[in-house]
């Protein structure tokens, strides 16, 4: 109804409101309008409105009806001194559409229309150039008008719980946006222009139908909170690793098979990745997350927890419930800030069920007590007693005799003291752990253990070459030399005929070490994060027991199609190499799909 006609109608102060009340539900009390003219704010939430009365849109245009009544105006009520409306709340009504007359309120900075029945938005919204917050959540919107992209001052846009299946391509024009909530819609992809939202701090994409995230999302340099819960993500773009401001990352209820590596996310405090299909928790996933206080990995398929979890010194909550974990690193008990540890629903062999129910502090106490049994913890030496020989003060004889373990790790030592080897005497040691020191060479005396040792760990040292003594450990099955300075392996390693697993990740190999092709017992070769430029598929095919080959983050410019004939490979990891094919979409489908693709490329 035209405002002029309404004003022309005779009657008292509420003249013309009768029909409005029938059409629009309850009328807006004059007292509210009067207060709104003074304050610039009008709250009409929860009034059962079927549409917005015209005089609300015209609140700053029409003179108040009291003026026509020649009522005495106090100083505070002089209509010609009224304030423009800056905040309008229409939430929790029954609105099915918003009038284009919204443009009559150009001073609006906040418009809240959440919890109505809107199926579309008026294009006139684009004219509200002062708008900073727009809340249209909990409606039935199927699309967003392009004109909305003109709101260059918008800081908060809440669109959650609608029926959006796509977004305008020009979304990146909202350059001042700091908060964007798109959760609980039907989105299958994100416009690449999102990369332009460089001031965005919070982005919620939860409960949509996203199968992947655009790599461009990494350009959002201000983003602190990213929520991708409950989508169909199988991988996360590696570019995410460069988002240095990220503090909270939610990836729950997706289809991830591994945790993303986030080397630059130094400020990340919370990582939620429960209810996925994660099987392996790598040291590389964890070692950069120095600020992490919450790690939530419940309801996955994780089989083991790496010792590197103890690098997360700020960890307060660790949820590993309902996985396939059979043993834990006891050093977990040493995490100083830990307040909550959930382990129920795992086939743990070493921890009784009743202990799990006693709570976190009892559990941590138990784990710490086992460290003493297992060997000295990195920070404390066993006490020297009158019965201890000076030379044995650093040696855990219990570990040597009962656990058959010779351990001297995390000591920052440049050499392994002779007394360690002296202590072994005639005891058959099966496991040697000299990791996390400053060793530049493999100690020659390791050859003294050749008749019993089968598991050797020299990880995280500064070793640049493998000694001939190591090649004489003829019972060796597991060799871990990750994070060293190796560039090659000696041909003499061919003598290690029982070697099943070798970890050479984070070294300096420029080529696949040729001697490995001749160690036919190998089942797992881990060579990620080197500079390997090529592999020989014909030689690899001869390694019939090889089931896992990790070549992630190397310099492979091409993947030979003949690699597809290595059908015994159950896990082939190739991400992070500069080759063009197979494309990321094929890699994401898993090993079987990659091998099939490669076979299809073999020239006939």
Image (cartoon, helix red, strand yellow):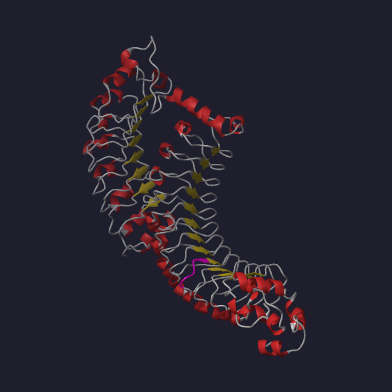
Where residue 519 appears, x then y in whole percent? 30, 40
Q: Tell me: residue 273, above or below residue 137.
A: above
Where residue 424 appears, x then y in whole percent? 33, 19
Question: What are the residue bounds of the magenta stretch?
Answer: 152-156
Residue 409 position by quadrant: top left
Q: Tell me: residue 468, above or below residue 515.
A: above
In the displayed structure image, the side of residue 104 where residue 589 appears, left or right: left
Q: In which quarter of the image is the C terminus?
A: bottom left
In magenta stretch: residue 153:
yes
Q: Tell me: residue 205, above or below residue 503.
A: below
Which residue reaches farthest top?
386
In the displayed structure image, the side of residue 31 where residue 437 appears, left or right: left
Where residue 300 appears, x then y in whole percent? 53, 47
Query: 110 or 442: nearer the eye?
Result: 110
Query: 544 or 240: nearer the eye?
Result: 240
Q: Tell me: residue 253, above or below residue 160.
A: above
Q: Is the magenta stretch mostly helix, strand or loop?
A: loop
In the displayed structure image, the side of residue 358 where residue 383 appears, left or right: left
Q: Quadrant of the N terminus?
A: bottom right
In magenta stretch: residue 181:
no
* Residue 425 visible in rendering: no
* Residue 211 visible in rendering: yes
For the point 74% across and 89% down, which residue is it?
9
């Amino acid at each position: 109804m035209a405002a002029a006609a309404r004003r022309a109608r005779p009657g008292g102060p509420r003249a013309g409101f009768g029909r409005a009340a029938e059409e629009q539900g309850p009328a807006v009390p004059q007292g509210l309008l009067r207060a709104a003219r003074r304050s610039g704010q009008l709250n009409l939430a929860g009034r059962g409105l079927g549409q917005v009365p015209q005089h609300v849109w015209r609140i700053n245009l029409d003179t108040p009806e009291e003026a026509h009544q020649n009522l005495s105006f106090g100083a505070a009520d002089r209509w010609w001194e009224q304030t423009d409306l800056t905040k309008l709340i229409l939430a929790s009504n029954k609105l099915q559409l918003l009038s284009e007359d919204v443009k009559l309120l150009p001073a609006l900075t906040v418009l809240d229309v959440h919890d109505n029945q809107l199926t579309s938005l008026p294009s006139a919204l684009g004219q509200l150039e002062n708008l900073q917050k727009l809340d249209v959540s909990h409606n039935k919107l199927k699309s967003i008008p392009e004109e909305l992209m003109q709101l260059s001052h918008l800081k908060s846009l809440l669109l959650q719980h609608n029926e959006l299946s796509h977004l305008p391509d020009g979304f990146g024009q909202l350059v001042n946006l700091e908060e964007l909530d798109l959760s609980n819609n039907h989105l299958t992809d994100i416009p690449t222009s999102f990369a332009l939202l460089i001031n965005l701090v919070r982005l919620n994409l939860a409960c949509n139908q996203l199968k992947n995230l655009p790599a461009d999302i990494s350009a959002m340099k201000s983003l602190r909170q990213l929520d991708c819960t409950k989508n169909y993500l199988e991988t996360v773009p590696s570019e995410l690793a460069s988002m240095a401001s990220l503090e909270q990352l939610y990836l729950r209820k997706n289809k991830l098979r591994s945790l993303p590596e986030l080397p630059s996310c130094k400020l990340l405090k919370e990582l939620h990745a429960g209810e996925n299909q994660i099987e392996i928790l790598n040291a590389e996933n964890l070692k950069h997350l120095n600020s992490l206080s919450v790690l939530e990995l419940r309801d996955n398929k994780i089989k083991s927890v790496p010792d590197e979890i103890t690098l997360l010194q700020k960890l307060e909550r660790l949820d590993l419930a309902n996985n396939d974990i059979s043993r834990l690193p006891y050093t977990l008990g040493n995490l100083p800030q830990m307040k909550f540890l959930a382990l129920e629903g795992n086939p743990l062999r070493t921890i009784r069920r009743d202990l799990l129910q006693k709570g976190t502090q009892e559990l941590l106490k138990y784990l710490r007590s086992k460290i003493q049994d297992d060997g000295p913890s990195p920070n404390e030496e066993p006490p020297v007693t009158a019965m201890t020989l000076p030379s044995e003060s650093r040696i855990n004889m219990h570990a040597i005799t009962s656990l058959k373990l010779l351990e001297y790790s995390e000591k920052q030592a440049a050499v392994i003291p002779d007394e360690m080897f002296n202590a072994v005497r005639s005891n058959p040691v099966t496991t040697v752990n000299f990791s996390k020191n400053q060793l530049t060479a493999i100690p020659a005396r390791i050859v003294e253990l050749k008749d019993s040792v089968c598991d050797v760990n020299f990880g995280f040292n500064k070793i640049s070459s493998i000694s001939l003594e190591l090649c004489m450990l003829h019972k060796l099955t597991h060799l871990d030399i990750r994070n060293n300075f190796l560039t090659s392996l000696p041909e003499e390693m061919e003598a290690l005929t029982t070697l099943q697993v070798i970890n050479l990740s984070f070294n300096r190999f420029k080529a696949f070490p040729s001697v490995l092709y001749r160690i036919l017992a190998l089942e797992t070769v881990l060579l990620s994060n080197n500079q390997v430029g090529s592999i020989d598929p014909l030689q690899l095919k001869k390694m019939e027991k090889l089931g896992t080959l990790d070549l992630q983050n190397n310099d492979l410019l091409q993947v030979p199609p003949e690699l597809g004939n290595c059908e015994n490979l159950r896990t082939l990891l190739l991400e992070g190499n500069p080759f063009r094919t197979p494309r990321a979409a094929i890699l994401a489908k898993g090993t079987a799909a990659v091998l099939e693709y490669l076979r299809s490329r073999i020239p006939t």
